[in-house]
Amino acid sequence: MTIENGSLESKPAGDKPPRSARGNPFWQAATALALAAIVVLFINIHQLGTSVAQQRDATTAQIAKLGDLIAQNNEASRQRVESVAREAHDSAMTAEEQAKADLRRAMPTWPPKSPKKPRSSNRRSNRRNSRWRGSWMS
């Protein structure tokens, strides 16, 4: 132990000076290799980020295209449904008009005239019955 400039310092038992890490060629090679690996990793990360961004853009474009296709299909389906509904309505209206026309041809007058009742051959019995009822039935 030595006292220099008012501080107490301790030195190892051997008077060998400590080896500097800079002086060892192994440490220099390891540091250079680590720096090279960092640069390679940085380049790979940058390329990966670029690739992911391109993939994201392509996916977004595909999703937009699919959305447009779905909208077109929905519109075409809606138009087909409206067309079928219109045709069904027109067909029903035509069938109704045809049925009404057939009914008019089958029954020329409405309400139908009641058939005439046949006259009885016994006029006297009709007169007797009408006299018997008298005027109180009128």
Image (cartoon, rainbow, N blue to C red):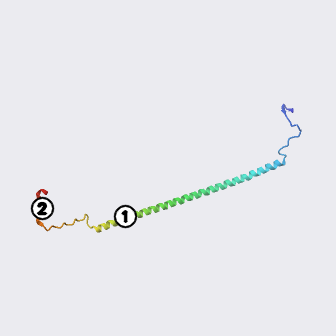
Q: Is residue 1 above or below residue 52?
A: above
Quadrant into which the C terminus falls: bottom left
Q: For this view, does 70 lie left or right of residue 107? A: right
* Identity, as a three-letter code, of the amino acid under mark 1: Met
**Number of numbered discs:** 2
| Residue beneath disc 2 | 129
Residue at 44% x, 63% y: name it: 84
Query: Where's residue 137, x and y in %?
Result: 13, 57
Mark number for residue 122? none
Residue at 61% x, 56% y: name it: 57
Query: If you read the primary sequence from the N terminus, does the residue marked by circle 1 or circle 2 appear first?
Result: 1
Query: Where's residue 2, x and y in %?
Result: 87, 33
Are the residues flagged by discs 1 and 2 in contact, CB closer than 8 Å? Answer: no
Q: Secondary structure at mark 2?
A: helix
| Residue beneath disc 1 | 93
Query: Residue 41 versus residue 113: which sits nearer the camera?
Result: 113
Residue at 56% x, 57% y: name it: 64
Query: Where's residue 136, x and y in %?
Result: 12, 56
Query: Residue 112 versus residue 86: which sits nearer the camera?
Result: 112
Query: Residue 64 versus residue 5: which sits nearer the camera?
Result: 64
Query: Where's residue 49, x and y in %?
Result: 67, 53
Residue 120: quadrant of the picture = bottom left
Q: CA distance from mark 1 to mark 2?
A: 55 Å
Residue at 12% x, 66% y: name it: 123
Most distant residue in the right direction: 15
